[in-house]
Amino acid sequence: MFKRYNQLVLKRPLVTNMVTTGILFGTGDCLAQKFFPEHENSTYDYQRSLRSIIYGTLIFAPMGDKWYKFINTVKSPIRSSNGNINKYLDVVTRVAGDQLVFAPFVGIPMYYTMMTFMEFSSNPLDDIKRKLNNSLWPTLKTNWLVWPAFQMLNFSLIPVQMRLLSVNVVSIGWNCYLSYIHNKK
């Protein structure tokens, strides 16, 4: 199965990443609804899961695909005569870019903005502003507890074409958390 996935991601990276990411975002939402329901008698919200799948497929996957290809080209401005040190510094620089640029200014705000927008409320701009004011900073702090260590491994050990998949696998838990925070009243 892994061999077939690798063939697909090399042949059709964007489509493969879109399908995979959509499924895994939906899985995270499903787990959030199952293990962290709003109320004791909450019924399963299929539209909520569909919004997660749409977001993962049409928004996050294309953005993530481009981001991981771009961040792979980033090099540390500090260079050494030792190639191993340069590789380590490049990984640290990529993790810093991912955590200090992408997460706070693109990834997390985009999630809350698009998920709130897809709820089709009567006042989406106010709802988006409220959601960002209430959730962005706590989510970012939690992000910094989870992602830097994983991204160090991801950027140093995983081939670039497989990085979005590795992030998506870990993101099942992360998407569960995001879904829980986004839907918490």
Image (cartoon, rainbow, N blue to C red):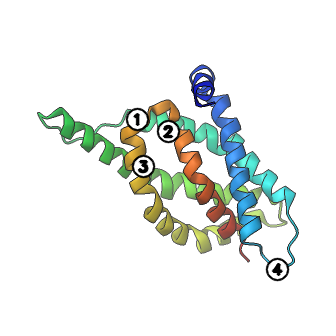
> From what the image shows, is residue 117 above or below residue 85?
below
Mark 2 / mark 4, whichever is N-terminal: 4
Question: What amino acid does circle 4 point to?
Answer: Glu
> What residue is pinned by disc 3?
151
Given this view, does label 4 or label 3 mark the residue nearer the observer?
4
Q: Which part of the image, by quadrant, shows the C terminus?
A: bottom right
Query: In the image, which disc is placed on residue 40?
Result: 4
State if disc 1 and disc 3 touch (CB < 8 Å). Answer: no
- Calculate the distance from the C-alpha at mark 1 to the C-alpha at mark 4: 45 Å
Q: Residues within 10 Å of mark 2 (few under 14, many from 20)?
A: many
Mark 2 / mark 1, whichever is N-terminal: 1
On the image, which quarter does residue 164 sit in? top right
Question: What amino acid does circle 2 point to?
Answer: Arg
> What residue is pinned by disc 1?
72
Mark 3 / mark 1, whichever is N-terminal: 1
Please state if 84 lies on the left or on the right of 118 as rendered.
left
Given this view, does label 2 or label 1 mark the residue nearer the observer?
2
Could you tell me which secondary element the residue under label 3 belongs to? helix
Question: What amino acid does circle 1 point to?
Answer: Asn
Mark 1 / mark 4, whichever is N-terminal: 4
- How far from the left and from the top, in percent, is residue 97? 39, 48
- Calculate the distance from the C-alpha at mark 3 to the C-alpha at mark 1: 12 Å
Looking at the image, which residue is at 67% across and 47% down?
Answer: 24
- Calculate the distance from the C-alpha at mark 2 to the C-alpha at mark 1: 10 Å
> What residue is pinned by disc 2?
163
State if disc 3 and disc 2 touch (CB < 8 Å). Answer: no
Given this view, does label 2 or label 4 mark the residue nearer the observer?
4
Could you tell me which secondary element the residue under label 2 belongs to? helix
Q: Residue furthest left?
A: 81
State if disc 1 and disc 2 touch (CB < 8 Å). Answer: yes
